[in-house]
Image (tube, rainbow, N blue to C red):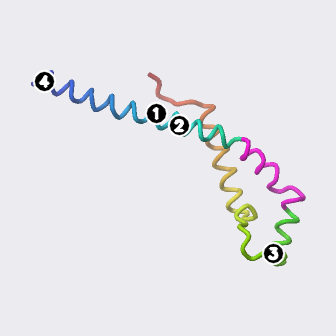
Amino acid sequence: MEQIERIRQMEMRLERSAAAVMELSAALDKYEAALEDIKALDAYYGSEEWKQDYADDEAARLPAGLKRGVLSEDGMWNLLSDAKELDDRLRRGFTQRV
């Protein structure tokens, strides 16, 4: 019975690991595709254009129905900080290796 249980346990580990590897690979592909957008947002945030857009929003010069999450200081800061932290994490690699 010990052999059967070992095989079952290893099979569960194989299934979990295979799913995690596929999910991480897909997530990295999606993140890599978003890097151009993140770079553009980083360049925009704090630029003279962003400052003007922010001022115009504060002065209610923009259309009421316009989505303006990009003018949220917290939203932009959080995204760019999270992206930097993720980039640092990817550069460091994982502490556990196969």
Q: Residues within 10 Å of mark 3 (few under 14, many from 20)?
A: few
**For the residue marked with disc 1, what is the amino acid?**
Met
Residue 46 part of the magenta segment: yes
Residue identified by numbered label 2: 26
| Overall secondary structure of the magenta section | helix
Magenta segment: 36-50
> Callout 2: 10 Å neighbours few (<14), some, many (20+)?
few
Determine the residue positioned at 33% across, 28% down: 14
C-alpha gap between disc 1 and disc 4: 30 Å
The quadrant in which residue 33 appears is top right
The earlier-in-sequence mark between 2 and 3 is 2
Where is the N terminus found, in terms of image quarters?
A: top left
Residue holding disc 4 = 2
Asked if labels 3 and 1 touch by Cβ distance under 8 angstroms, the answer is no
Q: Nearer the viewer, residue 59 or 73?
A: 59
Q: Of circles 3 and 4, which is in front?
A: 3
Badge 1 element = helix
Foreground label between 1 and 3: 1
Q: Left or right of 46: which side holds 27?
A: left
Q: Which mark is residue 22?
A: 1
Q: Amino acid at mark 2?
A: Ala
